[in-house]
Amino acid sequence: MSNPVRVRFAPSPTGPLHIGGVRTALFNYLFAKKHNGTFVLRIEDTDQNRYVEGAEEYIIESLNWCNIPFDEGPGKAGKFGPYRQSERKHLYKQYADELIAKGKAYYAFDTAEQLDAHRKDHEAQGKTFIYNWHNREKGRLVNSLVLSAEETQAKIDAGEDYVIRFLSPQDETLHLKDIIRGDIKIDTNILDDKVLFKSDGMPTYHLANIVDDHLMEITHVIRGEEWLPSLALHYQLYEAFGWQAPEFAHLPLILKPTGKGKLSKRDGDKLGFPVFPLEYISPEGDVSKGYREDGYFQEAVINFLVFLGWNPGTEQEIFSLEELVNAFDLSKVNKSGARFDPDKIKWFNHHYMQEQKNDDLAMAFQKSHDQLQEIDVNYIALVIGLIKERATFVNDFWDLGHFFFEAPKTYEEKAFKKAIKADTKDIMGTVKSIINGVDNFEVETLQRAVKGWITENEIGFGKVMMPLRLALVGDLKGPDVFDIMFMVGKNETLNRIECLVNSLG
Ligand code: GLU
């Protein structure tokens, strides 16, 4: 029997979680749930210089809002914790030492200035400096491959700064496997000897990531394409330790709306859509838009994100989370970049708007509008039932239905010209008395009375219905006129007609 599926989302808390990160988390979540596995959140905070206060909380809140919570992670104890790498600091050195003992890694004492000089030297000759087989033993670099064991030890004892580098092999071909990309061949001569352990006593991403994936018994690593170049090193590290490597799946890039280049925060700023799940306020006070605050439903965000790189192979576009868990399959994820289409997420939002309960929407609408504080929430819910078909966001409700709450203050100019004819005043006078005569003020009775009168007298429908709508709405828009009359009530309907008639002079 194979091991139970365990996957992890391993963000670094260096700022707000990009929407691409949410996609990675989602694919991990779906894969875990599909295989009755475990979804782990691991915070990769070994780079203290890039640590941003509040970023971890932001990541956790984002996953919770998206309804893709982790099973194990910070604050959710599991037997593989702790789940923050800074709290696992004591663990990593022994693994770096093990690689040195096995001859798979070595100490390097080159200072930042020395390395910089080598880089510049190479550049001057039109070459790129790579720290590897090519030059590491030529004596210009200061490492334990050129120094004797005694010299090396003396430097360490003297407290000189050092890093531990991986000894990447010469003239070998690595055969890597990726679930999405298939077989990948890599010539080791192009690889550099990556730093595994730094002079500040902290492991680099590569070492900590592999050690933790191993100790946390991760079976599948599902992450963004930007990590594909690290795959060769990661494979070699597993081999060097003698551990079984997990399976890997590198998700395609998320591209700009134009389809050219990687989606960035600037694209969002330029075109006015968020690239973060939640609003983010940086420690400097800069505010970045978030899908939640911009009025998107989490279901829409999830349904949209899953299509960035995956498709079910059918025409179905609307998926509940549960349906996604069933349908999701890593082998249906594409290699090629996925274009981010901000209009498509609106389309999903419009769809999920229709699925929300009117009562819930009414509460959200009431909260967001001062004018609604005193209004019965049940009435607001009825209004929403009449207008939500045309709404994408809760924020659209006021525009679509303000006339349910207040009489028109003005009449839209073009609508007025279109609706008002020489005989409108007389017609509206009669319509008013007909409406006044309707005792049972219901949609059907109103309809019967007004429409009956129109037909009997052979007046054009438009001649009556347009000014009536103008009186009620202030424009020629909105849901059914009889619904509006019923909702605002008899007195208010008569007042609004009266107002229009008076304005006609
Ligand atoms: N800490 C890495 C990141 O920030 C994790 C990459 C991986 O999943 O291996 O995305």
Image (spheres, helix red, strand yellow):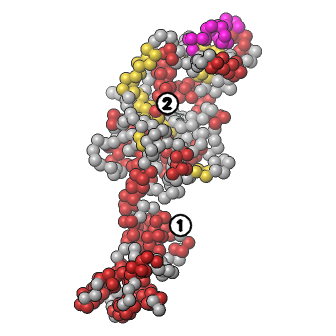
Q: Residue at x 66, y 25 (%)?
A: 201
Q: Residue at x 33, y 49 (%)?
A: 317
Residue farthest to the right? 158
**341, 304: nearer the viewer:** 341
Would the CB of label 2 be found within 8 Å of ligand 1? yes
Query: Could you tell me residue 408's position as x and y percent?
Result: 48, 80
Q: Is residue 228 above or below residue 132?
A: below
Total marks in image: 2
Could you tell which of marks 1 and 2 lies nearer the N-terminus? 2
Q: Is residue 336 above or below residue 420?
A: above
- Predominant SS of the magenta segment: loop
**178, 160: nearer the viewer:** 178
In magenta stretch: residue 146: yes
Query: Could you tell me residue 154's position as x and y percent?
Result: 73, 10
The answer to whether 79 appears left or right of 154 in the picture is left
Q: Which residue is mark 2?
A: 227
Would the CB of label 1 be found within 8 Å of ligand 1? no
Q: Which mark is residue 368?
A: 1
Q: Residue at x 49, y 42 (%)?
A: 263
Q: Is residue 194 above or below residue 333?
A: above
In magenta stretch: residue 27: no
| Secondary structure of the residue carrying numbered label 2 | helix
Examine the rendering and report whether any part of residue 139 can be seen. yes
Stretch of the chain drawn in magenta: 132-151
The answer to whether 338 appears left or right of 19 in the picture is left
Examine the rendering and report whether any part of residue 428 can be seen. no
Query: Could you tell me residue 355's position as x and y percent?
Result: 37, 60
Residue type pointed to by label 2: Trp
